[in-house]
Image (cartoon, rainbow, N blue to C red):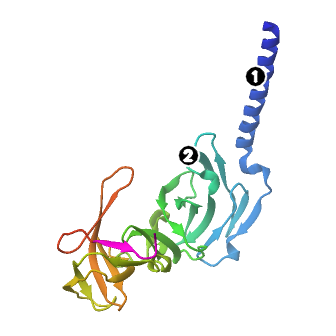
């Protein structure tokens, strides 16, 4: 019985060892299993952003230079963990990365430099890297943002961000590739407007409230006024200073104050009028 058990254990150990060795060899080979594709900068404008394939070897032709490029993305056996391996000229860099296999690489040329975006659309995961010609990586970092359409211009990245307008809402902005590859808004300050889908929902006030009222969305100055109960409105915008603007049916705009307090598992939304009282309302389009 013991001899039979030992044989089973030995056979199991050999199978496990073979699997581990196979995985190790696969990891070491990485991109090498695919035939290299040629990517010639001469086929692109002076500045460009191009979506490439992960786990595919490329030969970069940049002027008189020719060198390898590949981004290998692999999944770990634990949770959402993963790993990236970047090969670019003299760079050969491995890094841990969440949801690695759900991402794609964008090669970018902007301001006379090369950058890499490693992007996952599902969660808005974005690692941005400046690709140096040495064996180092500069400015490797991450951000949370979504592209609402395929990015094609480094100076006009179509970005959707989350904004607070009576809870989570979305705004679509134009960004550019900034220092070390960081995506930067083309308009650093100003209003952030809700997308059309957010603005379709209708709300109604359930109590009278003291608010700042503007004659239109373009008006620069408002006046304090009492907004009666039963006023119908929709989401409009926020200004990044804790103030939320809402659109009445007659095209007037009124302002309330919105902030988020610490809470578990989620932050607690606190919306008040200009008298400091809770802003009372309900949705007309949701049960």
Q: Which sits in the foreground, 186 or 146?
A: 146
Residue 96: assigned label: 2
Q: Quadrant of the N terminus?
A: top right
**Residue 84 x/y as whole percent:** 61, 49
Residue under the image location 45 percent in, 66 percent down: 179
Q: Residues within 10 Å of mark 1 (few under 14, many from 20)?
A: few
Q: Is residue 283 magenta?
A: yes
Looking at the image, do the residues carrying marks 2 and 1 touch, with CB atoms under 8 Å apart? no
Answer left or right for 241 relative to 154: left
Residue 93: assigned label: none
Per the image, label 2 sits on a secondary structure element best described as: strand
**Residue 47 x/y as whole percent:** 58, 76
Residue under the image location 72 percent in, 60 percent down: 58
Residue under the image location 29 percent in, 75 percent down: 206
Q: CA distance from mark 2 to mark 1?
A: 29 Å
Of labels 2 and 1, earlier in sequence is 1
Using the image, determine if residue 162 lies above or below residue 33.
below
**Magenta region: which residues?**
280-287
Q: Is residue 116 magenta?
A: no
Answer left or right for 208 relative to 196: left
Residue under the image location 57 percent in, 62 percent down: 117
Secondary structure predominantly adopted by residues drawn in magenta: loop
Q: Which sits in the foreground, 110 or 148?
A: 148
**Residue 142 x/y as whole percent:** 48, 57
**Residue 247 x/y as whole percent:** 36, 84
Q: Residues within 10 Å of mark 2 (few under 14, many from 20)?
A: some
Camera-near label (2 vs 1) is 1
Using the image, determine if residue 257 lies above or below residue 105.
below
Q: Which residue position is annotated with label 1?
A: 13
């Amino acid at each position: 019985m013991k001899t039979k058990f030992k044989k089973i254990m030995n056979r199991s150990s050999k199978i496990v060892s073979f699997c581990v060795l196979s995985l190790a060899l696969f990891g070491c080979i990485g991109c090498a299993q695919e035939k290299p594709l040629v990517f010639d900068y001469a086929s692109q404008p002076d500045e460009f952003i191009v979506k490439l394939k992960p786990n595919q070897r490329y030969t970069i032709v940049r002027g008189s230079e020719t060198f390898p490029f590949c981004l290998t993305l692999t999944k770990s056996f634990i949770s959402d963990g993963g790993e990236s391996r970047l090969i670019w000229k003299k760079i050969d860099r491995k890094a841990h990365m969440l949801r690695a296999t759900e991402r794609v690489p964008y090669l970018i040329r902007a301001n006379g430099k090369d950058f890499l975006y490693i992007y996952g659309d599902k969660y808005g995961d974005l690692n941005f890297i400046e690709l140096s010609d040495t064996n180092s990586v500069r400015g490797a970092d991450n951000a949370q943002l979504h592209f609402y359409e395929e990015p094609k211009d480094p100076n006009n990245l179509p970005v959707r961000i989350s904004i607070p307008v009576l809870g989570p809402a979305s705004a679509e902005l134009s960004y550019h590739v900034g220092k070390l590859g960081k995506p930067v808004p083309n308009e650093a300050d100003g209003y952030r407007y809700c997308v059309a889908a957010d603005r379709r929902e209708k709300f109604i006030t359930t109590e009278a409230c003291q608010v700042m009222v503007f004659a239109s969305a373009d008006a620069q100055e408002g006046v304090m006024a009492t907004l009666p109960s039963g006023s119908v409105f929709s989401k409009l915008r926020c200004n990044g200073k804790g103030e939320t603007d809402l659109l009445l049916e007659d095209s007037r705009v009124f302002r309330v104050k919105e902030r988020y307090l610490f809470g578990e598992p989620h932050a607690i939304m606190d919306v008040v009028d200009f008298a400091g009282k809770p802003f009372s309302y309900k949705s007309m389009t949701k049960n």
